[in-house]
Amino acid sequence: MPAEQIAQNLAYINWTLLTGLAVGCLGAAVLGRLTTAATRGYLGFIAAAGVVLALLAVSSDSALPVTAGGSPIAPDAAWEGARRGALWLLAGLGSAFVVVIARRGSGRVVGLATLGMGLAVLLAGAMSWGGDPVGRALLFVQLAALAAASGGGLASMVLGHWYLVTPKLPEAPLVRFARALEVIVLVQLALFVVWLATGAGPGGSPAFGALTGSWALFVWLRLVVGLAMPLVISWAAVQTARTRSMESATGLLYIDVGLVAAGTILAAGLYFGAGLLV
């Protein structure tokens, strides 16, 4: 049964969510430092949160089973050390970035190094579970999109809180973060269509066959709950932030975080449970 197969691979789903949140939060902190006027307090907080999430991802990684139960995914054990080492380095570089922010440094060098290490973590994950070279490339794209959406959503929601306690902040940073989240979800929606049209993933399926097969319920939930609804809510968050309705924007971003996280869980469950990219 599909639900049982997803349940057998919860450890991999947990890794995907925690790693995505860690990479996304640290990426948002770095890009926020380099391209927006977001406060040091906010950037330091979201970067520190990314470090904590990276350490949780290390713990999750150490608990991964040798095989993905009942799944077409065949883990490559040769990449286990590189994957875990990259997570440790991500946590270390993220910690250094927090210190640089606290000392009022620009953070450009260590920030870009942190961003690069985040991509290296996702690449190691793709090499571990992507199968052949094409599959690895596709999984890397999927993991990067999931990280940008989940971590970016959390970073945007936390930024909204900063406006509730510091109302004189300019609205530009929140508008930029919310708009970036909207674009990321739109890219995910486009990828969803491409994945289904090409039957991408180790599980293989006819063009759009996943919409009617035994996994159809979870595929439709991924589309409606994890993509369509966040896209609409992200758009609404941008509009409310532009009019300085920060309480409304923050509330919308709260909903966004839950929906995007649910979408990430569904996407990971479908990949590790059925070998489907969605």
Image (cartoon, helix red, strand yellow):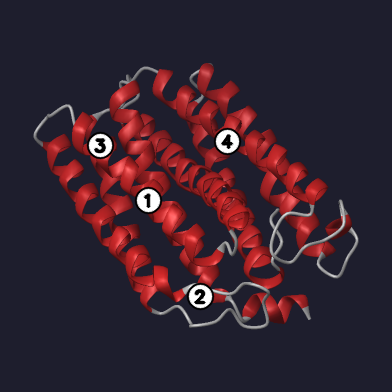
Badge 4 element: helix
Image: 19 above or below 183: below
| Tag 4–tag 3 contact (CB < 8 Å) | no
Residue receiving disc 3: 111
Give the answer, above or below, for where 246 lies relative to 5: above
Q: Name the residue tied to disc 1.
A: 120
For label 2, the SS is: helix
Classed neighbour count for the residue bearing mark 2: other residues with Cα under 10 Å, few (<14), some (14–19), many (≥20): some
* Residue displayed at 36% across by 77% down: 62
Q: Residue at x 62, y 81 (%)?
A: 8
What whole-number distance in Å separates the C-alpha atoms at marks 4 and 2? 26 Å
Which residue position holds label 2?
Answer: 11
- Per the model, the C-alpha gap separating discs 4 and 3 is 21 Å
Mark 1 and mark 4 in contact? Answer it, CB < 8 Å: no
Specify the label residue 45 is tagged with: none
Q: Amino acid at mark 2?
A: Ala
Cα separation, mark 1 vs mark 3, equals: 14 Å
Q: Earlier in the sequence, mark 1 or mark 3?
A: 3
Q: Amino acid at mark 4?
A: Ile
Give x and y (percent) for residue 127. Answer: 48, 60
Residue of label 4: 184
Q: Regarding mark 3 in the picture, which secondary structure is present there? A: helix
